[in-house]
Image (cartoon, grey):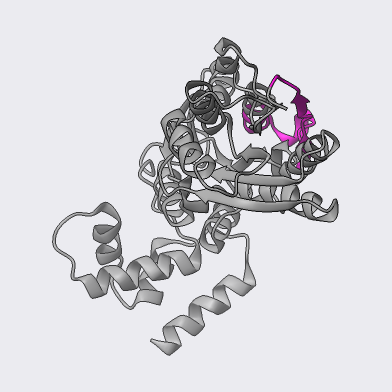
C-alpha cells in the first residue's frame, strides 16, 4: 500500500494540473478499477471498509466520477450547480432569481442543493454535482471545506461565490462586506444614543455571514462604551415566529436592552409584532434593527430600520461570470456591492 501511494504521489507531482483517473484511485485504495466503478455508481454490495478506502482515495486525489463520460467531454453541459444554505429565507429566493434570469439568456439551467449551513453537507453536494460535469458552480459564502477547494482546483470547474466579500474567494465572489454592515449599523445606533444592546440570531450560530456582522457590531459598540447585555441564538431556522419568541424571552428579563440587533429581517419582524401586541413602544421602550432590506417590511405599520442589500444583482453577476469566458473580459475578482442603511421608525 505504501508503494502504491508513493507511485501516485510521484505521478501527481509531475503534472499537478492533470485530472486524476479511476486508475489512480484504484492504486491508492488498493482495489481494482471495477471495484472503484461499483463504489462510485453505488451498485452491488461493497464492504464498508472498501467503500471508505475508495472514497478517501478519491477525496485525497480530487477525483470526481463522471456520470456523463460516455456522451459529454469536459465541463460544457447546459447545467450550473447552485448551492444555497436554506430555502425558507426569502434572501436566497431573490439571489436564485437573478441567477436563473441570467442563465436563461444562454439556454442554461440551474440545479441546486441545500447545505443547511453545514460545510460537510455542502461538500457532499459539490461532489455529487461535479459528477454531472456542470458548466459551473455557484456557492454561497467564502467558507468551504479543504476537500471542496481541492476538488474544485483539480477539476478546473468555473466557480463563483455570492453574498460575501470578507475572506479568500476561490476565484471570483460577488457580495457585500458583512463586517462593514455590522459596524455601520452599530455606528447608527450608538449615534442615536443607545448603549445597552441585545442580539438575536438563528441557525445555532452556523450563519457565518451573520456572525461576521455581529462581531463587527459588538466591536464597535464596545469601543464606543456600549455593552451587549443579552444574546439569544436559537438552533431553529429563522422565522417571524421565532423572532417573536426570542423577543418575549429577552424583553421579559429584568435587564431589558435599550436596542435589539437582529441577524435578519425575519427575526426583526417577529420582534416588532411582539412589541406591538404587548404595548412596547418603539423606539422609546426599545429600538430595533435588522438586516437584508426585505420588501415585506413595508407592510407593517412601523418601518423597521435595516440594511438593504442588492441580492438579485449579486445572483445575476455571479451567473454572468459562470457563462462568460476569460477571453470575454471576465477575470477572477472580488466584486463588492454597496449595502445601505434604511432608517425606519424603530431607531
Q: Residue at x 53, y 31 (%)?
A: 271
Residue 309 at x, y percent in the picture = 69, 27
Give the side of residue 87 with respect to residue 320, left or right.
Answer: left
Judge whether 344 appears above or below 3 on screen. Answer: above
Quarter holding the N terminus? bottom left
Residue 69 at x, y percent in the picture = 39, 44
**Closer to us: 98 or 170:** 98
Q: Is 133 colored magenta in this rendering? A: no
- Residue 166 seen in render: no
Residue 48 found in image quarter: bottom left
Judge whether 9 appears above or below 150 on screen. Answer: below
- Looking at the image, the residue that sits furthest to the left is 45
Residue 346 found in image quarter: top right
Q: Residue at x 46, y 59 (%)?
A: 63
Q: Residues in magenta?
A: 318-345
Quarter holding the C terminus? top right
**Closer to us: 346 or 155:** 346
**Closer to us: 268 or 134:** 268
Q: How many marks?
A: 0
Judge whether 305 appears above or below 86 on screen. Answer: above
Give the side of residue 239 with respect to residue 184, left or right.
Answer: left
Q: Residue at x 43, y 69 (%)?
A: 24
Q: Residue at x 56, y 60 (%)?
A: 150
Residue 102 at x, y percent in the picture = 60, 19
**Closer to us: 191 or 235:** 191
Amino acid at each position: 500500500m505504501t508503494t502504491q501511494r508513493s507511485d501516485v504521489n510521484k505521478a501527481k507531482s509531475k503534472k499537478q494540473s492533470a485530472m486524476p483517473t479511476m486508475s489512480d484511485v484504484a492504486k491508492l485504495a488498493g482495489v481494482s478499477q471495477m471495484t472503484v466503478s461499483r463504489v462510485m455508481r453505488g451498485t452491488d454490495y461493497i464492504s464498508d471498509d472498501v467503500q471508505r478506502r475508495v472514497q478517501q482515495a478519491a477525496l485525497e486525489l480530487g477525483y470526481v466520477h463522471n456520470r456523463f463520460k460516455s456522451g459529454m467531454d469536459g465541463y460544457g453541459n447546459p447545467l450550473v450547480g447552485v448551492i444555497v444554505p436554506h430555502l425558507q429565507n426569502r434572501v436566497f429566493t431573490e439571489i436564485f432569481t437573478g441567477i436563473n434570469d441570467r442563465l436563461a439568456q444562454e439556454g442554461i439551467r440551474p440545479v441546486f442543493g441545500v447545505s443547511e449551513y453545514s460545510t460537510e453537507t455542502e461538500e457532499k453536494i459539490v461532489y455529487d454535482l461535479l459528477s454531472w460535469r456542470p458548466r459551473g458552480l455557484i456557492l454561497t459564502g467564502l467558507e468551504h471545506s479543504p476537500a471542496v477547494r481541492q476538488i474544485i482546483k483539480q477539476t478546473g470547474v468555473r466557480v463563483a461565490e455570492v453574498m460575501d466579500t470578507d475572506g479568500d474567494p476561490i476565484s471570483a465572489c460577488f457580495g457585500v462586506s458583512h463586517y462593514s454592515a455590522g459596524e455601520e449599523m452599530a455606528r447608527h445606533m450608538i449615534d442615536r444614543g443607545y448603549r445597552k444592546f441585545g442580539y438575536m440570531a438563528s441557525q445555532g450560530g452556523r450563519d457565518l455571514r451573520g456572525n461576521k456582522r455581529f462581531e463587527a457590531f459588538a466591536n464597535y459598540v464596545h469601543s464606543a462604551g456600549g455593552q451587549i447585555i443579552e444574546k439569544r441564538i436559537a438552533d431553529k431556522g429563522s422565522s417571524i415566529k421565532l423572532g417573536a419568541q426570542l423577543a418575549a424571552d429577552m424583553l421579559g428579563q429584568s435587564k431589558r436592552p435599550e436596542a435589539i440587533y437582529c441577524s435578519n429581517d425575519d427575526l426583526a419582524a417577529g420582534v416588532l409584532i411582539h412589541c406591538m401586541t404587548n404595548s412596547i413602544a418603539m423606539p422609546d421602550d426599545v429600538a430595533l434593527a435588522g438586516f437584508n432590506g426585505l420588501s415585506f417590511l413595508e407592510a407593517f405599520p412601523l418601518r423597521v430600520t435595516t440594511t438593504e442589500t442588492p441580492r438579485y444583482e449579486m445572483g445575476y453577476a455571479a451567473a454572468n461570470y459562470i457563462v462568460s469566458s476569460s477571453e470575454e473580459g471576465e477575470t477572477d475578482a472580488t466584486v463588492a456591492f454597496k449595502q445601505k442603511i434604511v432608517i425606519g421608525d424603530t431607531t
